[in-house]
Image: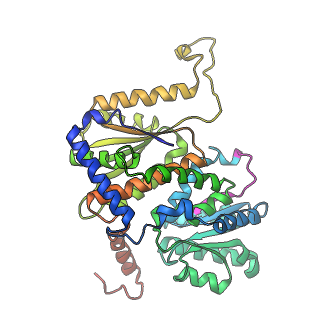
Amino acid sequence: MLKLNTEMILPFVEEQDYQKALDEAKMAYDILLSGSGPGGGMRGWLDLPVSADRQLVEDCKMIATRWLGSMDVVVVVGIGGSFLGAKCALEAFSHSFASAGERNSPHIVFAGFSLSEDYMSDLLGYLKKKSYGLIVISKSGTTIEPALAFRILRMNMLHRFGEEDTRRRIVTVTDPSKGALREMSLRYGYTSLSIPSDVGGRYSVMSAVGLLPIAVAGFDIESFLGGAREAREVLMNRSDDNPALIYAALRNIMYRYGKKIEVFVNYHPKLKYLGEWLKQLFAESEGKNHKGLFPATLDFTTDLHSVGQYIQDGERIMFETSVLAGSKEVVVPVPPSTDNLDGLDYLVGKTLEDVNYMAEKGTRMAHTSGNVPNIYMEMEQIDEWNMGQLFYFFEFSCAVSAYMLGVNPFDQPAVEVYKTNLYRLLGRPGYTDKQ
């Protein structure tokens, strides 16, 4: 199981405050598990690691097998929770230089997460001479960014491949019974998988939303779910040792102490999109009623050379939550040099991972000495099992933390404000008179 290390945050916390917050976390846990709090009907994600049925896993594998060898590229169309979980997982699992990898699976790219004309033009140009398929993920089918991307790509497919061939190239992931995308799937005969009605987007990575793209990319979704199951088994225990309750308690204490920003830190480029997923998870779950920590993300050691000065010596309004991952069974040693002009001969005999580990340790020492408390998660390596644990840990912690804050972890009412203005400005029927 992942290890939550609190040794560099507890010195900043008064013992009585910690015990009080931990008791509050247990009460929030009770609310979450009982479904008695606001949004209690949207807790289906809690059981996805054990309830994701065999048929769903087999369907994802079947689609992956069907497309293996016949699709050069698969475009995953989605935004928010229909995009970030899958993107995070695939970035973590994939070769850092995907085109140099030796996998036979289709190259996965993404669309529908922005309205950039340049991006869509580049994508269409990239796809021009490639055989490609679409995974379209949306509960409603009418969210403007993915809906527009789907329309453009579907028309491109029909022009290139014809109606019958297009049908086998499109898979939808949508509401089980309603919505525009469900209606299109039925009308045109697209293969379709369902998003459980009691699972919201940012908590959906263990459903077909995440499992299908991961499977099509050639990765092990059973190991992914297995890791999440192991985390669930640990986190379902109502105890002082539950790492999710400890984390939720500590981040709420930091908030009460005036630390308004939680900086999610990684030391590995493969985890860059973990930060993007975490930003949505915590911002949409907690940022309500003028409450909530502001989630930010940093990539270390890269960003130490850009914003490191501010973190060390700027306003004391933040704390850090780091995700640390061991290296896989690869060794990149520091080689000897004939001239030592760079002065690095003292590192000969160490590996790059040794140096990175000391950078992690040195950074935590520096920042805590500068009154930036640090929490860090430690996992053995970046793979399907460990990432399954990590996703489930943060989902569970976030829901508990939001209930501690007194807000609904599962809605996002303010997101509709920008949508209403956008639709009115574009002249969408029914919105032109709205203010």
Instruction: From this view, report whether residue 214 is shown above or below residue 150.
Output: above
- In the rendered image, residue 348 lying in the magenta stretch gets the answer no
Query: Seen in the image, is 366 located left or right of residue 182?
Result: left
Query: Looking at the image, which is closer to me, 126 or 170?
Result: 170
Residue at screen point 67% across, 78% down: 190
Residue at screen point 66% across, 48% down: 98
The reply to whether residue 429 is in sight is yes
Query: Seen in the image, is 270 located left or right of residue 403?
Result: right
Task: Locate residue 247, reporting x and y percent.
Answer: 36, 46
Question: What span is in magenta?
Answer: 100-110
Rendered image coloring scheme: rainbow
Instruction: From this view, report whether residue 44 is shown above or below residue 86.
Output: below
Task: Locate residue 277, reporting x and y percent.
Answer: 46, 55
Residue at screen point 32% across, 69% down: 38
Quadrant (top left/top right/bottom left/bottom right) for the C terminus = bottom left
Query: Seen in the image, is 205 located left or right of residue 424?
Result: right
Task: Locate residue 40, reporting x and y percent.
Answer: 37, 69
> Which image quadrant is residue 159 in?
bottom right
